[in-house]
Image: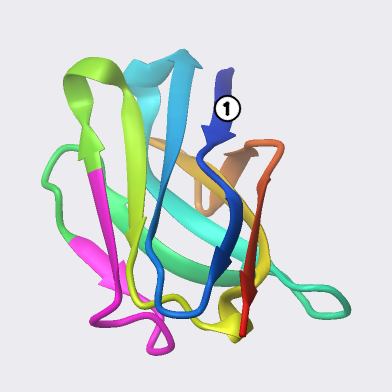
Amino acid sequence: QVQLVESGGGLVQAGDSLRLSCAASGRTFSIYAMGWFRQAPGKEREFVAGINWNRGSTGYADSVKGRFTISRDNAKNTLYLQMNNLKPEDTAVYYCAVRGMNSDGYNYWGQGTQVTVSS
């Protein structure tokens, strides 16, 4: 089991920045990749960014490329999402997730943190 706790959400204005954090605990040695997802009201959850835990290779949704940066601190077992130039359409609950070594997909999820961007 891996436990995840997100933090850093809040209410900001368009153009502002926020940094989300996700602290992982438990069987962290089994992490293959971590990612950020988001779900806006009335919409399905969507992938935002992902990172290979050991290699550090990253991937982003087109909607956030050039504005968001995913990173991790392996020593602290913490995942980050730096969000710059936020837009109202970035408003959503943001979730971090873990893909385990033997998993086909993300199988551990945090409780989510709300990000609201006003225009």
Q: Give the percent coordinates (x, y) of residue 95.
A: 60, 50
Q: Is residue 114 above or below residue 86?
A: above
Q: Position of residue 16 (x, y in %)?
A: 41, 69
Q: Quadrant of residue 39?
A: bottom right
- Nearest to the observer: residue 89 or residue 117: 117
Q: Residue at x 47, y 14 (%)?
A: 25
Q: Is residue 17 left or right of residue 107?
A: left
Is residue 33 one of those drawn in magenta? Answer: no
> Residue 108, percent across and down?
60, 36
Q: Is residue 64 above or below residue 11?
A: below
Q: 29 or 61, which is in the foreground? A: 61
Disc 1 residue crowd, few under 14, some 14–19, many 20+, Cα 10 Å: some
Q: Which residue is mark 1?
A: 5
Element class at badge 1? strand
Q: In the displayed structure, would residue 46 be above or below residue 102?
A: below
Give the residue type at disc 1.
Val
Magenta-colored span: 58-71
Left or right for 93, reference 70? right
Q: Quadrant of residue 58?
A: bottom left
Colouring style: rainbow
- Who's the residue at 26% across and 18% down the image? 76
Quick one: quadrant of the N terminus?
Answer: top right
Residue 60 lies in the magenta-colored region: yes
